[in-house]
Image: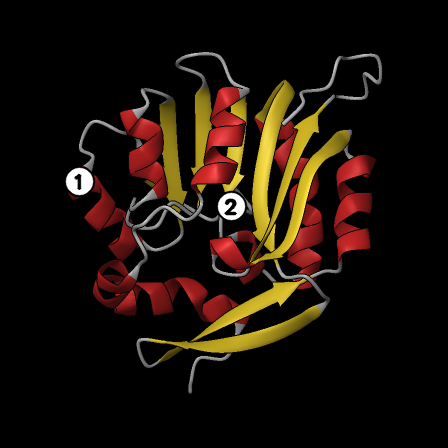
Amino acid sequence: MANDSPSSVAPVYDRIAGWFDSNRVRTLIERPYLDAVMEALPPGASILDLGCGTGEPILRYLIERQFDVIGVDASAAMIAIARERFPNTPLLVGDMRSVAFDKRFDAVIAWHSLFHLPPADQRAMFPIFARLLHPGGLLMFTSGSTYGEVWSDNGGEALYHASLDADEYRGLLEGQGFRVIRHAADDADCGGATVWIAQYRSGDHHETPTRL
C-alpha cells in the first residue's frame, strides 16, 4: 500500500470516494448510539457532523429527524456526493483541526473521523470540541481501544488510523470540562467500534448530567 502518512487521508478519500460510498454499510449499526444522543436533545437541535463523508447513513438519519445539521469533511469528493443528496443542508470542505463557526452546537459527532488524526492532533481536538459546544452539549466520537497507529487497505489505498488509550481519552475529556456518560469498547454489534459519548459542562460541576 502507498500514501502511508496522516497528511494523505483527505487525498486518499478524494480518490476512493465512489468506492467508499458504494461499500459504506448503510444498515445504521450506529443507531443505538445516535438515538441515545438524539433522545437527549431538544427537537431541532443543532448538530455538527465532523467527518460526514458522503452523508450515508448518519447525516441522512439526522436530517430525516429534522435536526439542524451542518456537515464537514476534509475530502472535497466526499462532500460533492453529499451535496448531490442533501442540497438544502450546509456541507463544508474543511479540516476538523481548524474548523471555526460563529455559533455553538448542541451536539458534535465525529464518527470514524477523529481516528484519522495522529495522536498529537487528537489531543489538540478536545479544546476545539469544547469551543464548539453549548454548555450541556453532547460529544460523540469513536476511537480505537488501545494506543497505536495502523494503516488499512480501503479500495486499494492506504488510510492512516491512530488511537490513544481509554485512560488518556477520559483524562482529555475531563480536563476540558466533559463528563463521560457512555463508553463502549469494541462493540461487536457496531462493527467493533469503540464509542464515547460525553457531556460538556463548561466547568459547572453543579449542572445536572444527562443520563443515557
List x then y, in percent, for residue 128. Answer: 63, 37
List x then y, in percent, for residue 134. Answer: 61, 19
How many numbered dots are placed on residues in this image? 2
List x then y, in percent, for residue 141. Answer: 57, 45
Q: Is residue 102 visible?
A: no
Residue at the far bottom: name it: 1
Q: Nearer the viewer, residue 185 or 169?
A: 185
Work out whether 88 lies above or below 74: above
Q: Residue at x 47, y 76 (%)?
A: 152
Residue 72, quarter of picture:
top left
Q: Is residue 92 visible?
A: yes
Residue 24, quarter of picture:
bottom left
Q: Nearer the viewer, residue 53 or 189?
A: 189
Eye-nearest disc, 1 or 2: 1
Q: Residue at x 47, y 49 (%)?
A: 95
Q: The N terminus appears in which quarter of the rendering?
A: bottom left
**Disc with the residue nearer the chain's start (1 vs 2):** 1
Residue flagged by tag 1: what amino acid is it?
Arg
Q: Nearer the viewer, residue 63 or 33?
A: 33
Task: Tell me if label 1 and label 2 are in contact, CB under 8 Å.
Answer: no
Answer with left or right where residue 200 lies relative to residue 186: right
Q: Residue at x 20, y 27 (%)?
A: 88
**Residue marked by disc 1:** 85
The crowding category of the residue bearing disc 2, from other C-alpha atoms within 10 Å (few below 14, some 14 to 19, many at least 20), is some
Residue flagged by tag 2: what amino acid is it?
Met
Work out whether 41 lies above or below 82: above
**Residue marked by disc 2:** 96
Q: Nearer the viewer, residue 204 or 80?
A: 204
Distance from the alpha carbon under mark 1 to that under mark 2: 22 Å
Work out whether 46 lies above or below 147: above
Residue at the far left: name it: 84
The crowding category of the residue bearing disc 1, from other C-alpha atoms within 10 Å (few below 14, some 14 to 19, many at least 20), is some
